[in-house]
Amino acid sequence: MKTDLALSSSALDELVLQAQKPSRYVGAEFGAVVKDLSAARVRFALAFPDTYEVGMSNLGFRLLYHLLNDRPEIACERVFLPWPDMEGMLRARGLPLFTLESRAAVRGFDVLGITLQFELAYTSALAMLDLAGIPLLARERGDEDPLVLGGGPCAFNPEPVADFFDAFAVGEGEEVALEIADAVAESGFRRGGATRPELLRRLARIPGVYVPSLFAPRYDPVSRTLAAIEPLLPGYEKVERRVMPDLNALPTSAYTRPLVPFMQTVHDRLPIELQRGCTRGCRFCQVGMITRPTRQRDPKQVLALAETGLRASGYEEVGLLSLSSGDYGALNGLLDDFLARWEGERIAMSLPSLRTETMNEALAQKIARIRKTGFTLAPEAATERMRAVINKGNREEDLLRAVESIFGNGWSLLKLYFMIGLPEERDEDVVAIAELAKRCLAAARRVLPKGEGSPAIHLGASTFVPKPFTPFQWEPMIPPEETRRRQALVTAALGGRNGAIQFKPHDSRQSSIEGALALGDRRVGTAVLAAYRRGQRLDGWTEWFDERNWLEAFAECEREHGVGLDWFAHRRRRLDEVLPWDRIDCGVTKAYLQKQLAAARNLAEVPDCVLEPCTVCGACDYDVVKNRTYEAKDYVPEPPRPPRPTDPPARTVVRVRYAKLGRLVALSHLETMHALLRAIRRAGLPVAYSQGYHPKPRVSFGPALPVGLESLCEHLDLDLLGAVDPQEVLARLAPELPEGLKVQEAHVLDPHAASISEAQRAVHYRAEFPRETWGEAVLEARVAAFREADQSVVTRAAPPRPRGKGRGQKVAARKQREIDLKDIVTHLAVEGPGAVAFSLRADPSGSAKPAEVLAAIFGEDGTPPRGVKVLKEGVSFARSGPGRPEPSQPRAPRYLDA
């Protein structure tokens, strides 16, 4: 919808099509919400400082999107950090960062809410502000600039980026996000009402909102430590995190019409939160402390959300998310009902975050029935002593029993994750990582059934990074050189990195930077800004992280403030030291964390308070905020469902013609296929499946449409169970398609008819040229020159073919193929100002690409002319029988009918 904020659609279309992954910038997904921005009382840009595929895998981000849009007066749109190629093109053209839904300038929104999921995203957040045209420093913003709001786990220590944000939402955002939006609306901010300082003071009255400008840090000139964080607003001295006491009371609109991305995201599935919070008490785990207490969702609601979400999304997998899925008391009953309901429909399920002591034979058998890809366990430490230090709560026999259950049920790959650099760690604890992995491999070899291949273990070891609000927040982290030394101990104990155990150590360069950003105070902002100005963004991506830029940035911080990287990351803090996050209350008390640090040094383990008496950590009020769990005995299984009917013997093959228009021209062929397959699943069409170990829906697609072309005549063939009316197929499929995909017609096909690709004989196009540079006479001259030529040869290079395996593989020389367009172009004519129609022969022997035709006839130096829009108007098919032509989309009699 066009608004006063909307950017030039044609300019953005051109850039999107030039980007490495155009679908990152398309928007228009099924489930996306587009409102009239000019009519909205609050315009909220929800931002994730990473790429689309990372941000759209974040459950909290997706939940907030639907939550905000559930309110009629709020228009919430998404924005992600462009990949550097797209960022460069936007800057070169002078175009600002834009939202996906309306392609509106981010700077025109009232609120820019940025999710800070991990510390290495800080420079990416600055890149988003800069690209949007918003001043980086909060103190330099005027009343015409959006409110810049931060949230997510990093908001529990916002000081390193406090200079760049107006406010932070601390804790769980379901309620506080709406309260902030209400405050912005009621204040009249950016609409002639409250000024920015007035709005910030109003936000400070909302529980869970931290306004950095209303606190002033003071430093000790001798020790250089933080001496105090002084409140500047009377009564505003502490910010308590927000917490949702009951998961069953959360809104569920994200499941009634979920967002379904076109491109494959990092976690491409329907995410359902099984439980929130964890009281296991792992002493290194920040999220386990700041999300206490344990709150489990009613298993009946889990099943209901799965049913609603699968039907509304078309996803093929459900992810049951939690910090420790095995602690969910009703898990076995839930899995039984899940299998009874969806196993026959080929719905997969993933259970991330399974602890070794909760993995057992029964659980492995259930999961094996649902999916059998790789399996992941995180023992974290390899010796009993170190597991006591970190309060991990598992034993070696638990791990070996879990390994036997996993490989005994047919898995052949296990991923094991450990940490190095933990407090109290010795060299023998590091070497034990390799030795324990070897024992796991031996156990796997004993139980892996014959015929399942050879067992393999992928071993990971990340460097421990102390985080705020954990018992280890006072501890130093080991420097990069020590990280590499300990990694070498593991490699040597394994006898190298090859073989059945593959060791992949974590990048030591990033860990120290992450530690300094996690534990830093407001002075670290100098390094963040300096790193950004040196070109840093997307620091979570190995290819974009540059250690030298960060070291120079922290050197600049040290020159300005007298403290640098070593000070923030590799220094032990005194227990009585003022910490940058002391003005924030996460629920767990500082006294409890100090008690846990002493327990770690004494190898004292503390039990889970769900199972044992309360340890008085401070997170609960024992009335509203408290542990809420479900036990196995409380679970009432679903009543038995009638057996799934056998597939009818009759089959109907239906050929569907559909159009691909508008923004969706940026989708690749594979992405279009996925979008259609999920629409078919949403429509509930009775698609037949192939046989074998990995059954696939029997849906056939036509040849790939080049990215950037609109089409009125794409085709797919559906192999359907039973006798099906093609008009019913159209009626059911049409409402399940995203905007830009439109079904046109459907008809029953002879089951023995040739495939779409084999039956295709000619493809018909219409090209629209910019009239200011391509007059009718110019086009006629080019067409006449082509007709008079004896040949028009284009050379096409075959794609490179790798030879060999692994890093040593070589790329074979690209073979070239010559195509004479005089044999391919069956029709070419100018049809009015700026319009050219052409037809290309297309059969199993091959054809030409529209871009090749445009380049050869109208281009210069083998390059197609710019600004030309091409529409695929029709397809001619071979006759399927005597006197029976296949339906096609002919536009005019001029087209050849093969």
Image (cartoon, rainbow, N blue to C red):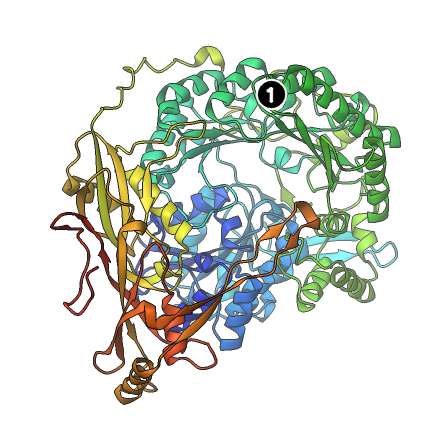
Q: Is residue 660 visible?
A: yes
Q: What residue do we see at 37% from left, 55% from top?
A: 704
Q: Quadrant of the C terminus?
A: bottom left
Q: Position of residue 411 (x, y in %)?
A: 58, 24
Q: Out of 887 and 411, give the one closest to the viewer.
A: 887
Give the residue furthest to the front: 790
Q: What residue do we see at 20% from left, 27% from top?
A: 650
Q: Is residue 704 above or below residue 408?
A: below
Q: Is residue 398 above or below residue 178?
A: above
Near mark 1 (Cα within 10 A), the count class, few <14, some 14-19 or many ≥20, is many
Identify residue for label 1.
406
Q: Is residue 755 above or below residue 196?
A: above
Kind of residue sitting beneath label 1: Ile
Q: Position of residue 111 (x, y in %)?
A: 46, 59
SS at circle 1? helix
Q: Position of residue 819 (x, y in %)?
A: 41, 68
Q: Is residue 850 above or below residue 35?
A: below
Q: Out of 248 and 313, give the one closest to the viewer.
A: 313
Q: Is residue 209 left or right of residue 156?
A: left
Q: Total label count?
A: 1
Q: Out of 426 and 11, give the one closest to the viewer.
A: 11
Q: Position of residue 390 (x, y in %)?
A: 75, 28
